[in-house]
Amino acid sequence: MPSTAPDVFHQALEHLFAKDMPGFIALFADDAVMEFPFAPPGRPSRVAGRAELHDYLIDYPQTLDIRELADVTVHETADPEVIVAEFTATGVVVATGEPYRLRYIAVLTVRAGRIAYYRDYWNPLAVQELFGEGARA
């Protein structure tokens, strides 16, 4: 299992691209937190604990078929446990067949080889346009 923050992040992207959500979720600590600072009204801005993360993420491939993860850049910080990652996800909205392309910026904290904190920045207006109100990216 990867141990550095960049390695854990790259492993997470591999699981996401492979639609291996159990593998993706397993990279999170039991008490991990995901935050979505730009979440639209009516959507969670915070998901805490692996059980909640599981419920939130497990069906992601049935919502969005990610076909490419590109422009991946990882910025290491003064704290070796914290990285800032940028990437573009391209795919298809499963329900509509519409193309999907969205740029993400994420701040991750990795402790003992597990993601302890994941703050996910994405454009809620673009997501609402593609998925409708109450969508998740």
Image (cartoon, rainbow, N blue to C red):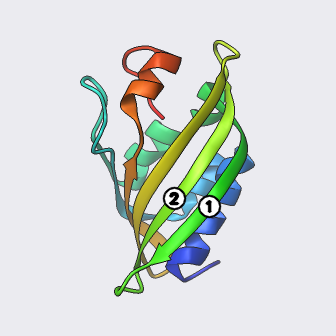
In the image as oriented, which residue stretches furthest toward the front? 71
Secondary structure category for the residue under label 2:
strand
Name which residue lies at 48% across and 45% down.
54
Q: Which mark is residue 86?
A: 2
Give the answer, above or below, for where 39 lies relative to 69: above
Q: Bin the neighbour count of mark 2 within 10 Å (Cα to Cα): few under 14, some 14-19, many 20 and up.
A: some
Q: On the picture, is 91 further left or further right than 53?
A: right
Give the answer, above or below, for where 127 lies relative to 14: above
Residue 37 visible? The answer is: yes
Quarter containing the N terminus? bottom right
Name which residue lies at 42% across and 86% down.
80
Q: On the picture, is 62 further left or further right than 135?
A: right
The x, y position of residue 3, in whole percent, is 56, 82
Residue 58 visible? The answer is: no
- Pick the residue in front: 127 or 45: 127
The x, y position of residue 77, in whole percent, is 39, 81
The x, y position of residue 4, in whole percent, is 54, 82
Give the answer, above or below, for where 111 lies relative to 45: below
Name which residue lies at 65% across and 34% down.
61
Q: Bin the neighbour count of mark 1 within 10 Å (Cα to Cα): few under 14, some 14-19, many 20 and up.
A: some
- Pick the residue in front: 132 or 2: 132
Amino acid type of the residue that numbered disc 2 sits on in the rendered structure = Glu
Asked whether the residues under the numbered discs 1 and 2 touch, taking CB atoms below 8 Å apart as contact, a structural biologist would say: yes
Give the answer, above or below, for where 49 lies relative to 90: below
Q: On the picture, is 86 further left or further right than 12?
A: left
Secondary structure category for the residue under label 1:
strand
Q: Which mark is residue 72?
A: 1
Amino acid type of the residue that numbered disc 1 sits on in the rendered structure = Val
Counting residues from the N terminus, which is met first, the one under dot 1 or under dot 2?
A: 1
Find the distance from the CA under tag 1 to the CA under tag 2.
6 Å
